[in-house]
Structures are given as structure tokens and as C-alpha cells.
Amino acid sequence: MQSKDISGFGKLTLGAGLAFLYVPILILIVYSFNASKLVTVWASFSTHWYGVLFNDDAVISAFGLSLKIALFSSAMSVVLGTIAGLVLARFGPFKGKSLFAGMLTAPMVMPEVITGLSMLLLFVEMQQWFGFPAERGMLTIWVGHVTLCMAYVTVVIRSRLVEMDRSVEEAAMDLGARPFKIFFQITLPIIAPAIASSFLLAFTLSIDDLVITAFLSGPGSTTLPQLIFSRVRLGLNPEINALATMTVLVVTLLVVGANRMMVKAERRRARLAAAA
């Protein structure tokens, strides 16, 4: 009887938690189809604000810039984070390893205000000494996002490498395989799901970032979070609801697509292991 009560309480808690997370998003999606200019007053069903959104050049430009920065930042973060995770997981103790690990994970625990301000001062000094970067924009934002996202990617990749069974790699080394061949033909396919998860995590962090972007952006480099924040400060607009709904849709499609790819890859590896 007691176990049933605990089970029921667990289900209730889970339902309350999910409702707390997703009901506001569902309300936002519903009100994106509201014909009224007042976001909290329902008038009638309409797709008017989606038409306004697709004709808003500022929104389209900001979304394009955010998407490019997020894709480039995620790609570079995965490359650097995989290398860093491999060093921490596969290399033995070396001088400065603790400092190296601490510096890699520092952006995760450091306030973004401090990270953004420190990088802003760095770029200002570089501009005075070397004339580079000529101006703050997409490049400086990209560097800031890579600095932030690489820390998360490193933690994920390192955890996967630590849990990985090294017997296959050791067998390949015994057979004379080179380290690069072992990595690309054995290690990389095994940690591919972790790399995909890291890419999605880095993409989400980059496309959502506002604080670091505010420090490192310049004229003509307004990202989508900056645009949304500036417009919301002037008052809620149904067009923002439509924009948020489109963002939720895109992210959902990306997550579902990546999940299906990882499931298929895992099943393929399981079939190959069973056949062997």
C-alpha cells in the first residue's frame, strides 16, 4: 500500500514538474495565433503575426546571424572539446593537468558577465596593439561562444571516454594500428552519440546567449536574443510569440532528428557486435 502511495506521489510530482516547464510554452504557442495586438487578450484565431514575422527584415537578419554563429561555434567547440576531452581522459598525469582541466571548465562556473567583460577588455587591448579585430561583430561573438561552449563539450566527451571500454583500442594497437587510425575508425564511432549531444548542447547555448553577446557585439551584429530583449523591453508583441513558436519548432525538429540518428547508430553498432 505504501509503495502505491509513493508511486502515485512520484507521478504527481513528475506531472507537476512537466506542467511547470511546458505549460508556459504551450500558452505562448497558442497566443501566437491570436489576432489581437494584446498578447494576453484572445480575440480570434489568426496567422497574421506569422506573416508580419516573415516580412520583418530585422528579425530575419538577426536570426540568420544567430544561426550562423551557433553552427560555427558548435562545430569548433566540438572539435576543440573532443581534443581536450581526449587529452584529459587518455593522457596520463602530466605537469599542469589540474590547471589545464580547471581552465577548461572555468567558463561553466564563472558568471557570464565576468566572461563577457574580460573578453571585451582582451579584444580592446588586441585592437590597440595589433589592430585586430578591426571591429566587434560576428568574429568576436563567435570566439566568445566557443570559449563558453567548449567547456560543456569537454565535460561530456571526457565522461564518455572515461566510461568507454578500452579493450577494443588496445586490441587494435596490438595489431599494429596507428593512433590516428584507432581514433577515427574505433574511438570516434563509439563516442559519436556523445559528440552529437555535445553539438546540440553547444548549439542551444550559443543561439540562446545574450550576456556574452552583448559585450562582444558591435553595430550591425545584432543577434536574435538581443533583438528579442530590446523589443520586449518596449512591451510584449504578438510577433515575438510567433518568433518564439518558430524557434521551438526548429529546436524540436533538430532534437528529434538527432535522437533518431543516434538511435539508429546505436542499433547498428549492437547488430555488428552481435554478429561478431
Image: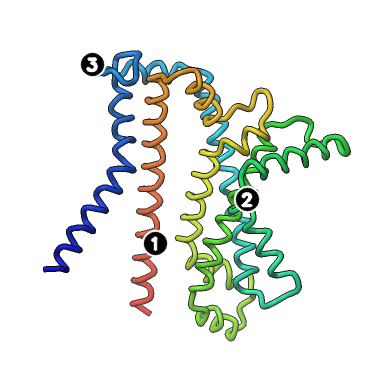
Labels 1 and 2: the sequence-earlier one: 2
- Residue 258: x and y in percent read 40, 51
- Give amino acid for label 3: Ser
Residue at the outermost front position: 2
**Distance CA(mark 3)–CA(mark 2):** 46 Å
- Give amino acid for label 1: Ala
Residue 97 occupies quadrant = bottom right
Q: Secondary structure at mark 2?
A: loop
Q: Does residue 87 lie above or below 211 as drawn?
A: below
Name the residue located 57 percent from the left edge and 35 percent from the top edge.
210
Tag nearer the camera, 1 or 2:
2
The image shows a total of numbered marks equal to 3
Which dot marks residue 44? 3
- Foreground of the two, 75 or 36: 36
Question: In the image, is 8 to the left or to the right of 37?
Answer: left
Tag nearer the camera, 3 or 1:
3
Instruction: Return the residue at label 1.
Output: 265
- Residue 103: x and y in percent read 68, 59
Which dot marks residue 110? 2
**Distance CA(mark 1)–CA(mark 2):** 36 Å
Name the residue located 75 percent from the left edge and 30 percent from the top edge.
135
Q: Secondary structure at mark 1?
A: helix
Tag nearer the camera, 3 or 2:
2
